[in-house]
Image (cartoon, rainbow, N blue to C red):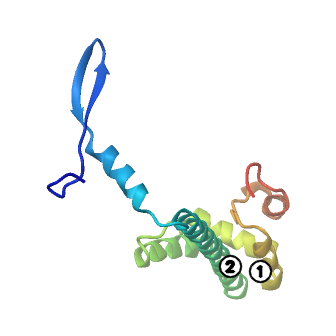
Amino acid sequence: MNSTGSPAVKRVMVRVGSQEANHLRPECFLMAERRALVPAGYSKLLSDLKRRIQAAQLRASLAVNRELVLLYWQIGRDILARQERESWGAKVIDRLAIDLKAAFPEMKGFSPRNLKYMRAFADAWPKEVIVQQLVAQIPWASIRPCPANHKRSLQLRFSAPRSGST
């Protein structure tokens, strides 16, 4: 601080190309001044808080993924049950896609194709207990079966770990 109470500002010589220029760099001195005012243990507290915040963010996103996968399985189960019990055709899925998109415009994933994937997911694993166990073990929980062979594709997706994921 200078005698007026404002932060000390020094001139710094900077070479730009072949010319030198005088520049005021108060931010450098303010940062150095702030570091000097930091109490003992502050850095450790800051790093601990950052670590806890990141861990909480990860847990929250994993919980959201688990809930969405269970929701998608339940949607698929309900579509499958209605189609079997009431002989609903494929046009119902198209209509559901339109109505769900209208009801939840901010959400993605309710296309006719995705609703058919949800139905295939429920067909591959008809018991919710098994789905819950699978979802608990798979944090990435991405379900995109190949249309040719739904059940086998879903089994491969759930049993094979993704490269680069933890």
Q: Identify the disc placed on residue 94.
A: none
Q: Read off the residue under disc 1.
A: 132
Q: Nearer the viewer, residue 85 or 14?
A: 14
Question: Is 107 situated left or right of 62 in this image?
Answer: left
Q: Residue at x 78, y 78 (%)?
A: 131
Residue at 60% from the left image edge and 62% from the top image edge: 113
Q: Position of residue 156 (x, y in %)?
A: 83, 58
Q: Secondary structure at mark 1?
A: helix
**Mark 2 neighbour density, 10 Å: few (under 14) some (14–19) many (20 or more):** some
68 or 14, which is in the foreground?
Answer: 14
Amino acid type, residue under disc 2 in the picture = Leu
Q: Position of residue 47 (x, y in %)?
A: 57, 63
Q: Is residue 127 left or right of residue 65?
A: right
Residue type pointed to by label 1: Gln
From the viewer's perspective, is residue 114 above or below residue 33?
Answer: below
Q: Single out the residue that lies furthest toward the left.
A: 4
The residue indicated by pointer 2 is: 70
Residue 74, given in percent of the width and then of the height, sits at 67, 82
Q: Are marks 1 and 2 in contact (CB under 8 Å)?
A: yes
Q: Tell me the residue at 57%/73% (across/down).
A: 93
Quarter of the rendering containing residue 117 = bottom right
